[in-house]
Amino acid sequence: MRQIFLDTETTGLSADNGDRIIEIGCVEMLHRKLTGNNRHFYVNPGRDSHEEALKVHGITSEFLKDKPRFAEVAQDLLDYLKDAHVVIHNAPFDLGFLNMELALIKQPPVKSVVASVTDTLVMAKEMFPGKRNSLDALCDRLEVDNSGRTLHGALLDAELLADMYINLTRGQDALLMDEAPATDANGDRVGALDLSQFVLPVIRASEQEMAAHEDVLKQIDKSSNAKTIWRSHEQKTPDTVA
C-alpha cells in the first residue's frame, strides 16, 4: 500500500473566509516503510497571515513573496497524490483548504484523485476517548520524538504524523503472518519443525506462592469494595467448587 502523510500550513483558520495555503508537506510510505520520496511546497498566498497563525508557523509574507502560487504546483501535487492512500490529522481542515485552492483553478477535489483518506484524529479519538489527541499529545503518548517542533511546519508535521501513525497502528502488525518460507544462513529452505517430539514441563505454583497470590487478590478486593471481576464471576457461578 502506498500511503502519503500530508499536512498544510495556512494564513488562518477559515478557507471560506479567504484564508489560503502557504505550505504543503507530503511524506511517502510504502508497505509501512518510509521511502524518502517526499514533496514539499511553499506557496505565495497573495495575502498576509493572521497574527495568531503567524505565531504558530512563523512563515512571513516576506519569505513567501518569491514562492510560486498554488496554481503552479497543483499539477505536481495531484500527480504525486494520484491513487495514494492519504493520511491526515484532522482531515477536514486540510482537505477544506486544498479543495478550495483546487476549485479556484477549476481542478477536482482531492478525494477524486486519491484512493482513500484516513483521519488519524478520528482514529485517536476512538482509541483514546476523553484524552487530548493533538499531534503533540499523541507524539508524547506514543513515544515519538517531537523535540524539534518549536514551530509548526508542514513537512516536519507530516514526518511526525507518519511516525505517530506507525506507533498508533503497531498492534495490527502482531496479527500479520509472514508467509515467506523460512530459510537458513545459506538461503536453503528449512522444513517445518515437528514440535510433538518436545515434552514441555509443567511447573506448578508452590503453597507459599499460592498463598501470596491469594493475599494480593484479597488486597485488590478490599480496594475495589469487592467489585473485582473474578469475585463477581464466582458469585454468578453457584457450581464453583470451593
Image (tube, rainbow, N blue to C red):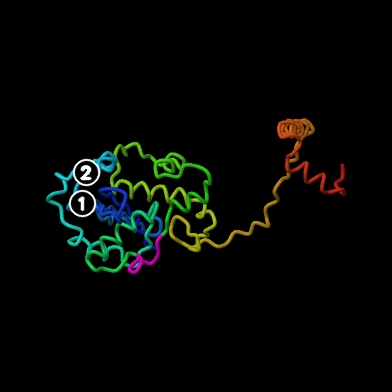
Please say whether residue 209 is visible from this viewpoint.
no
- State yes or no: discs 1 and 2 in contact (Cβ < 8 Å): yes
**Res 116 → quadrant:** bottom left
Q: Earlier in the sequence, mark 1 or mark 2?
A: 1
Q: Is residue 99 left or right of residue 63?
A: right
Residue beneath disc 1: 42
Q: Position of residue 69 (x, y in %)?
A: 17, 57
Residue beneath disc 2: 59
Q: Residue furthest left?
A: 66
Residue stretch rendered in magenta on the structure: 111-117
Q: Is residue 236 left or right of residue 24?
A: right
Specify the amino acid type for callout 1: Tyr
Q: Is residue 123 left or right of residue 5?
A: right
Q: Could you say which quadrant of the image residue 219 lies in?
A: top right
Q: Give the CA distance from mark 1 to mark 2.
A: 9 Å
- Residue at 73% across, 43% down: 229
The answer to whether residue 3 is above or below residue 237 is: below
Residue at 67 percent across and 52 percent down: it is 198
Q: Secondary structure at mark 1?
A: strand
Magenta run includes residue 116: yes
Residue 225 shows which numbered tag?
none
Which SS class for mark 2?
A: loop
Q: Quadrant of the C terminus?
A: top right
Q: Is residue 43 above or below residue 134?
A: below
Q: Where residue 158 appears, x then y in whole percent?
A: 33, 50
Q: Residue at x 77, y 30 (%)?
A: 208
